[in-house]
């Protein structure tokens, strides 16, 4: 194609991309968070995140006790949902005595207004409420409705599933829950769950956080320290603010100015996942989780810790793909899922789509090795010829090594 014609084509494509790009509502249209919503400031949400993404176009399923659809703080973001607890609702009734599902939804996509005026970190996201508890969270009743709720959320176009619930298990992830998680992973849905709140007591292993394919979240306080009750388990991948947080309840008479728990942390990380997905609509769920882990702020001892995983999520950096994440850096939820799906097999790359490793890679290595020998011989021959002809040898190649941006740690 002639250069001039190519230039015209590129200009036309650029104009088309501008024409079809969705216009993001001005950040000023979203109510500012209250000063007590302290996590907004360290995450630079208003300054660096909301001008790019507010969760628009992403549905977050909240698998919980239902959500009160009349609360002004969340009514504008609420979709008709479902009920797998046997109550027969569309999810827009909160059966918890204090309104757990409602408060989690407000942390994710709160609209301001109402008595609390609380704002979620992804206020343009939509909430799909799914009652999986009927207000009664017990170990022997959670697995089946939770599994059904995950499938319902996937079938109703949720791109992120928030599970601010945890129940102890001594026999691993319940089979019906694991099957539902596999269904969600196959449909490119991010699953986020709370690590548990008994870290200072029995510190039990909790599902669904311990299940492969689920991003398990611990809780930290305003000083970036682990909450004393957050679970200390090897399945924890990240942490997020969860202490001394204002939350709403099931109706205007409930307001909790100092709420604690990994439930809160989970809701914020689910909101963060929605923000990343809205900013990068074609990014696979596996890579969304990889970014949330890879851009986290390491706390405590260097590396993976049982209470905070790989660190506290930094929403502003996860959203900004200018902060590169090494393709080989850890992605425990999916690495464990791959191992569950293919026991004894070779694990896929942490950031890969889960496809099996390319066959015959050893042949490629041999070809490259042979090619390097040929190049070396060519240089030797050229040098010999130069000496014979009296000309100077070939110039030494300049050092082209550059800093590997993909492996740098985000600065503080």
Image (tube, helix red, strand yellow):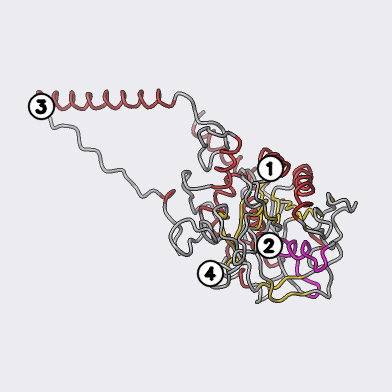
Q: Considering the numbered disc 1 on the image, is that residue within a helix, a strand or a loop?
A: helix
Residue that label 1 marks: 178
Q: Nearer the viewer, mark 3 or mark 4?
A: 4
| Residue at 57% in and 52% down | 235
Residue that label 4 marks: 225
Give the mark, 1 or 2, whose residue is nearer the N terminus. Answer: 1
Q: Nearer the viewer, mark 1 or mark 3?
A: 1
Callout 2: 10 Å neighbours few (<14), some, many (20+)? many
Q: Which residues are magenta?
A: 96-115
Give the mark, 3 or 4, whose residue is nearer the N terminus. Answer: 4
Residue that label 2 marks: 263
Give the mark, 1 or 3, whose residue is nearer the N terminus. Answer: 1
The circle on residue 190 is none
Query: In this rendering, would 401 be left or right of 152?
Result: left
Inter-mark Cα distance, 3 to 4: 67 Å
Inter-mark Cα distance, 1 to 2: 21 Å
Query: In this rendering, would 363 be left or right of 138?
Result: left
How many numbered marks does the figure carry?
A: 4
| Residue at 78% in and 46% down | 144
Inter-mark Cα distance, 1 to 3: 70 Å
Residue 155 magenta: no
Percent x, y for residue 389? Answer: 10, 24
Callout 1: 10 Å neighbours few (<14), some, many (20+)? many
Query: In this rendering, would 393 be left or right of 403?
Result: left
Q: Nearer the viewer, mark 1 or mark 4?
A: 1
User: Which corner quadrant of the image does residue 176 belong to?
Assistant: top right
Q: For the C terminus, which image quadrant?
A: bottom left
Measured along the vertical axis of the image, is residue 76 above or below residue 378?
A: below
């Amino acid at each position: 194609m002639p250069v001039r014609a190519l230039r015209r084509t590129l200009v036309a494509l650029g104009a088309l991309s501008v024409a079809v790009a969705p216009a993001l509502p001005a950040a000023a249209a979203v109510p500012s968070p209250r000063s007590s919503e302290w996590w907004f400031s360290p995450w630079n949400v208003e300054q660096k995140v909301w001008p790019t993404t507010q969760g628009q176009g992403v549905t977050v399923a909240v698998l919980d006790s239902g959500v009160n659809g009349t609360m002004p703080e969340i009514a504008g973001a609420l979709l008709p949902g479902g009920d797998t607890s046997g109550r027969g609702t569309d999810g827009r009734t909160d059966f918890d005595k204090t309104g757990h599902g409602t408060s989690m939804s407000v942390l994710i996509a709160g609209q301001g207004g109402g008595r609390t005026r609380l704002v979620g970190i992804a206020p343009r996201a939509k909430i799909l409420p799914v009652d999986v508890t009927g207000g009664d969270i017990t170990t022997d009743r959670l697995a089946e409705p939770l599994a059904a709720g995950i499938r319902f959320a996937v079938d109703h176009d949720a791109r992120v599933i928030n599970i601010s619930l945890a129940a102890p298990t001594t026999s691993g992830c319940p089979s019906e829950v694991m099957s539902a998680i596999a269904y969600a992973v196959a449909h490119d849905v991010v699953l986020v769950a709370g690590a548990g709140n008994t870290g200072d007591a029995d510190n039990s292993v909790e599902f669904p956080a311990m299940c492969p394919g689920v991003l398990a979240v611990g809780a930290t306080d305003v000083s970036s320290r682990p909450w004393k009750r957050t679970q200390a388990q090897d399945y924890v991948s990240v942490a997020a603010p969860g202490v001394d947080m204002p939350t709403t309840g099931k109706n205007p008479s409930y307001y909790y100015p100092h709420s604690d728990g990994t439930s809160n942390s989970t809701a914020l990380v689910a909101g963060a996942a929605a923000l990343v997905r809205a900013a990068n609509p074609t990014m696979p769920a596996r890579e969304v989780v990889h970014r949330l882990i890879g851009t986290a702020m390491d706390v405590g001892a260097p590396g993976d810790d049982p209470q905070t995983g790989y660190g506290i999520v930094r929403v502003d950096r996860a959203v900004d793909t200018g902060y590169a994440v090494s393709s080989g850096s850890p992605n425990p939820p999916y690495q464990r899922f791959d191992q569950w799906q293919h026991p004894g097999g070779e694990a896929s790359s942490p950031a890969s789509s889960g496809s099996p490793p390319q066959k015959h890679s050893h042949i490629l290595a041999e070809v490259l090795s042979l090619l390097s020998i040929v190049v070396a011989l060519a240089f030797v021959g050229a040098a010999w010829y130069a000496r014979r002809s009296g000309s100077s040898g070939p110039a030494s190649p300049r050092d082209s090594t550059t800093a590997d941006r993909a492996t740098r740690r985000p600065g503080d």
